[in-house]
Each structure stands twice: as C-alpha cells, then as structure tokens.
Image: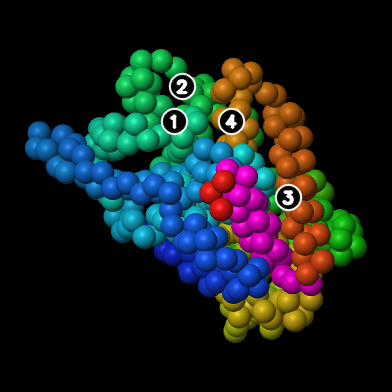
Amino acid sequence: MVTKNHERIHLDDKNLCHLAMSELEDLYTDLGLSTEELDLLDMPRRTFTVHFPVRMDSGKIKMFIGHRVQYNDARGPAKGGIRFHPELTIDHVKDLAFLMSLKCAVANIPFGGSKGGVVVNPKGLSRNELEHATRGYIRAIADYIGPFKDIPAPDVYTDEKIMAWILDEFERIKGEHVPSMVTGKPIELGGSKARSYSTSLGGIYVLEEAMKKINLDKSKAFIAIQGFGNVGENAARLLHEREYNVIAVSDSKGGIIKEDGLFIPAVIKHKNETGSVIDFPGSKNITNEELLTCKCDILIPAALSDQLNRDNAPNVKSKLVLELANAPTTRDADDIFFDKNIMLIPDVLANAGGVVVSYFEWSQNLNNDYWEEEKVLEKLKKTMITAFNDVYSLCQEQKCRLRKSAYSVALKRILEAEKLRGNL
Ligand code: NAD
C-alpha cells in the first residue's frame, strides 16, 4: 500500500541500519569472529547499479538509475524488496540487504537477503511512466534475478500492482510462466492467502509465546498499539478477534484510550470515516507520548523508528514490548528496558511474518499447489514459534537481550552455511 508515511519509513530504515550495525559490531567482538568471517560478513556478494531509458509521457527519453544488492545467498536464493524512492543510495540498499539476510536467517527460512530499487519519486510519475520505469528496471536486472537467484517483493512505494508488472515483464523476457520469481503478487497471479496481514499475525504468534515465558495471562493483558496503518490496524483487529483487551491505539494525528478496552471494529470504521482514530466516541483522546507511557501490559510500536528513547523509556509501564515497526527503540531505551526487566521482542523477529509468508508464496508457486488460508496460518504459526524459541533459548543461556540473541542466531546460521559450502 502506498501512503505518505512511506517517506518517513524510508528514513526509519536508515535508523534501523544504524542501530543494527552498532549492535552487530559489539556482537562480532562477543562472538570472537575470525578475520575471514568478518570479511565475509562485511561484503555483499553482488552489487548492481543499472541505468536504463524510460520514454516519458512527453515523448522524451529519461535515464533512470536502479540498484540491486544480493548481500548473502549461502542459505538460499536472495530475497528482498524493491523500493522506489528519490533518496535511494547503494549504501543504504546494501545495509537493508544485509538486514534481510539476518531476518530470513532468524526465521530460518531458506533464503538469503537482498534489496533494490529505483531512484525516483513515484508521485512525480504518471501511471504509464511508473509502469515503464518498473519494466525498464526489470529488463536491466532480469539476468540476475529469478526464483533460484533473487526474488523481489514490495517495499516502500511499491505494491502488488507493481509486482504484477514485474512478473509480466520477466515472463515476457523468459517466454514462460515463472510466478515464483516475485512475491507479494495479487492472489489472481499466484499471491498467497493471508499475506496482507502476515506481518501482524506473525508478531502475535511470537507475542503469545513470549507471554507464556513471563506468565502473562491473556485475560489480564492490556495492550496499547502505536500506529494504525497496515501493521498496527491489522494487529489491533487480530488481537481483538482473539479476545485481547486493546485499550489504546494511535495514528499520526494522536491517540485514544479506553481503560476497559476499545471495540476495535468500530474504531476501524471510525478511522475509515473520519481519517483518524481520534475522537472515537466513548474514548479519551491522548497524545502519542501518553500512549507509549500509559498503564498497559503489552506495548506494540507499529509506526515509526525512535519512538521509545532515553526520555520516555523510564516511564514505560508495560511488561512486554513487541517491535512490529522497524527500529522503534533506541539503544538507550533498549538498555533501560533490559535493566527494568521489560521483555523486548526485536523487530528482526517480531515483524518477520511478512517474509515468512513470502516464502510460502514462493513455495506454492514452485509446486503449483495453492494453500487454503488455514494452512498458511498454521505454517506461519509453527515457523514464528520455532524462531522465537530458538532466540529465547540462546537469550536464556547467555543472559542477554533478545535482540542480541536474534542476531547471534542469524549470524551463526549464515556462517555455518558458508562453512559447509567451503567458503570459510
Ligand atoms: P503504514 O504507512 O501503513 O502505517 C503507519 C501508521 O503510523 C499510520 O497509521 C500513521 O498514521 C502512523 N503514524 C505516523 N506517524 C505517527 C506518529 N508520529 N505517531 C503515531 N503514529 C504515527 O505503514 P506500515 O506498513 O503499517 O508499517 C509500519 C511499520 O512497520 C514501519 O516501521 C515498517 O517499516 C514496519 N514494517 C512493515 C511491514 C509490512 O508488512 N507492512 C513489514 C515489516 C515492518
């Protein structure tokens, strides 16, 4: 879904990379990695920059720049989104591709990590120009992507309509059907059921497993969610359907609270009618800052980065933080939560449900066997719970934060695959 918030999400990813890289540097020391291992992790396997012509509506040709980075593919074909953004740089794409390698390894799905995109402001293009730019980019990188090489997906400013053009262009070049070359496609072209809400549901599966570890009972769990877009709204809806008590939600205009629980279907209707969750009848308006520090048991940041920082972290009252957004917690806040014994489930694990269902989509395409929604959900649940327990066990063993153990699990899996291949 293309929204103006994606402008900000692109910036958030820069924070995510910065945070992850500083965390990883400490981890490299703790894990005692060899020079060979460090060199291998430091360098993306393949980095492409392409220049391609697009005929604009004026009849003139304009040259466009596209990037694609396949950071690591020791565990399987590279997997990562394609974004259209005017400030896209190859260095940022490299960092994001590395994080995708880690995310796929944490979830233990057989993919490496990649990322790519076109340097363009899609809002400045007509529909035809957008389609021609998409097709031009795919023609330029077609030899280097494919179901067993590198599989694109939607990202900032790209959506299922663009994935459909990508598929069509690739299939024209190859002269055959290859639905497994891209994920996030419309269902009619081989997309998977449940993908639209898989990030939120994957997070909920992980949350439920975490609640067992800290003996937090569903009936006593009051939940606050920051952000009411794709991820936040779906999380609120799914939690409500599972009879959780969501007491506070917010969007960019502000938040609302109702201590004995919000009726989420009515909040969604109110937001669709008025454009915001604020002024929902029977609730009290609050600021986003008040939402983050309200009296709740579970806090779910699902909007932007850097929301939980050294200023507000000491006032956070929840027992558990589920990072559905990318990088919502600064390192200072992370330390404060650790000291306060607040369990923080890191983004690399909490929001991996989207890429897990992408893997299911790829698998369904390859086998030409399409699953009912129940089967997708059952497999998503199993994958997310296993991933959580892998990370949690290591965290218990090493008495460290879940973020650190998630990265450790991922790095070990990647390095092990490299060793088995004889690359280390
Ligand atoms: P979105 O654009 O659909 O929704 C973002 C929401 O945040 C909107 O409701 C917006 O009003 C709200 N918001 C903006 N500024 C805010 C503020 N200052 N305070 C509170 N709320 C504010 O985006 P999304 O797809 O839901 O993504 C949200 C986060 O989840 C991002 O960090 C994104 O990188 C991450 N994420 C998304 C997916 C996915 O599948 N969509 C997967 C992994 C991670």
Q: Any mark on residue 387, and which?
A: 3
Secondary structure of the residue carrying tag 1 is: loop
For the residue marked with disc 1, what is the amino acid? Gly
| Disc number lying in front (2 or 4) | 2
Q: Which residue is mark 4?
A: 361
* Beta carbon of the mark 1 residue lies under 8 A of ligand 1: no
- Between residue 423 and residue 8, name the one nearer to us: 423
Q: Nearer the viewer, mark 1 or mark 4?
A: 1
Circle 3: residue type: Ala
The label number, if any, that marks residue 146 in the structure image: 1
Q: CA distance from mark 3 to mark 4?
A: 19 Å
Label 2 near ligand 1 (CB < 8 Å): no
As drawn, is 392 to the left or to the right of 234?
right
Q: Secondary structure at mark 4?
A: helix
- Which badge, 3 or 4, is on the more N-terminal residue? 4
Q: Residue at x 9, y 37 (%)?
A: 60
